Amino acid sequence: MIASPEKYIENFRNAGADIITVHYEACTHLHRCLHQIKETGAKAGVALNPHTPVELLSDVLEDVDLVLVMSVNPGFGGQKFIYRAVSKIERLKMMMIERNINAYIEVDGGVGLQNAERLLQAGANVLVAGSSVFGAANPTRAIADLKMIGSGGWGSSDCSGL
């Protein structure tokens, strides 16, 4: 999360980023920033901190390719998952269905085997698993187990982004 992300969009794109995600809380002019991202040829994403309601995206939802629901407060790895994120994902998914929007719903923070299937069922299709993979005794096995959940091996969830 950086302040004034509009100053750095070109740099991230020039470095090879295909998707550029900005925090809602860091953008004074979110609509302008999303269009600035798209003008570079990148896909545009918006991240929401745990306390930020998804309804605040109502006026720009058609402009996003991805919404990142933060399920911990930004800053460091290893934090506990904030379970209110599940209902945020469900509300966001309903907003997208009602408006026929096909953007990714990504979740970052405290994601692991204990909650991955529930997140997918709520509507997420991209999961970021850091500490649960890199802190595992066998990271390769942790990734395989998460992929099994995403492929429907442990449930009926779809995880095209995992």
Image: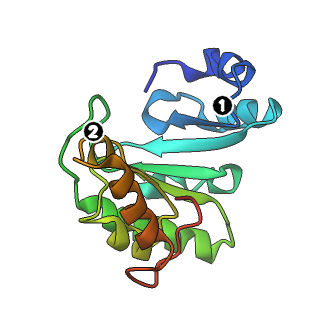
N-term-proximal mark, 2 vs 1: 1
Q: Where is residue 29 in the image (x, y as percent from the top left)?
A: 60, 30
Q: In which quarter of the image is residue 13?
A: top right
In the image, which disc is placed on residue 9? none
The span from disc 2 to disc 1 (Cα, nearest Å) is: 22 Å
Q: The residue tagged with tag 2: helix, strand or loop?
A: loop
* Disc 2: which residue: 73
Q: Name the kind of residue labelled 2 in the image.
A: Asn
Residue at image coords 59%, 58%: 104
Residue at image coords 65%, 50%: 64
How is this picture coloured?
rainbow
- The one nearer the camera, 53 or 139, is 139
Left/right of residue 137 with respect to residue 158 in the rendered view: left
Residue at image coords 24%, 41%: 135
Q: Where is residue 1 in the image (x, y as percent from the top left)?
A: 43, 27
* Disc 1: which residue: 33
Q: Quadrant of residue 146?
A: bottom left
- The one nearer the camera, 82 or 16, is 16
Q: Can residue 91 be seen in this view?
A: no
Residue 5 vertical position relative to residue 42 in the rendered view, above or below: above
Residue 133 vertical position relative to residue 41 in the rendered view, above or below: below
Residue 74 vertical position relative to residue 66 in the rendered view, above or below: above
Residue at image coords 62%, 14%: 7
Left/right of residue 11 with respect to residue 106 in the rendered view: right
10 Å neighbourhood of mark 2: few (<14), some, or many (≥20)?
some
